[in-house]
Image (cartoon, rainbow, N blue to C red):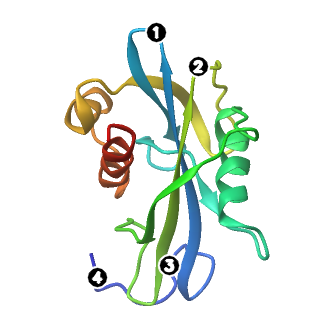
Amino acid sequence: MGRTGLTGRGILYKWGANHAADPIVIARSGDADKILLIKRQDSGQWALPGGMVDAGEKVSRTAKRELAEEAGVDVSEVEGVEVFAGYVDDPRNTDNSWMETAAFVFVVDFTPQPKASSDAVDAQWFDIGGGVKSLEEATGGLYASHAEIIGEALKLINE
């Protein structure tokens, strides 16, 4: 976290903080809790669905919009709880342009069939009974700071 040694804006949209929202959808149905992840088109890594906040858009709205766009899942009627907000260690960061995200956890009692679209090449439910470590083993490693963010969500729902 911190200085990258890279100058300029890189591939990010603007100088300074680039704000994003990441929905964490946890399904509590059946035998085991599951989490919805997408496979990113750009890196091929499994990640939380999410994306950039549009000008004037509430971050919580961005999380729901991006979930629908990337995984075809609607949680518009579910109240989300913010579990993280701030700088994230992202491979797109430079010293002059970086990612900051707000992550919201949505706990649902259903597992809708996800459909990858937009920036995702796949979307699937993963078992989270073994925690973040087993999730990372199952996916071959999660994108950017997503393991840490998911860890915060699991702490919250297991309290």
In the picture, the disc for residue 111 is 2
Q: CA distance from mark 1 to mark 3?
A: 44 Å
Foreground label between 3 and 4: 4
Measuring from the top left, give residue 57's x and y in whole percent. 77, 69
Q: Nearer the viewer, residue 107 or 146?
A: 107
**Point 52% across, 64% down: residue:** 102
Mark before the other along the chain sequence, 4 or 2: 4
Instruction: Give the number of the mark in front: 1 or 2.
Output: 1
Q: Earlier in the sequence, mark 3 or mark 2?
A: 3
Q: Confirm or deny contact between disc 3 and disc 2 (CB under 8 A).
A: no
Give left or right: position of 115 versus 88: right
Q: Residues within 10 Å of mark 4 (few under 14, many from 20)?
A: few
**Residue 30: image tag:** 1
Q: Is residue 79 above or below residue 86?
A: above
- Measured in 3D between alpha carbons, the distance from the residue under mark 3 to the one under mark 2, in whole angstroms, is 37 Å
* Lower position in the chain sequence, tag 4 or tag 1: 4
Residue type at mark 3 is: Gly
Label 4 sits on residue: 2
Mark 4 residue type: Gly
CA–CA distance between discs 3 and 4?
A: 16 Å
Density class for disc 2 (Cα within 10 Å; few <14, some 14-19, many ≥20) is some
Instruction: Please name the amino acid that badge 2 sits on.
Output: Thr
Vertical placement of residue 2 versus 155, above or below: below
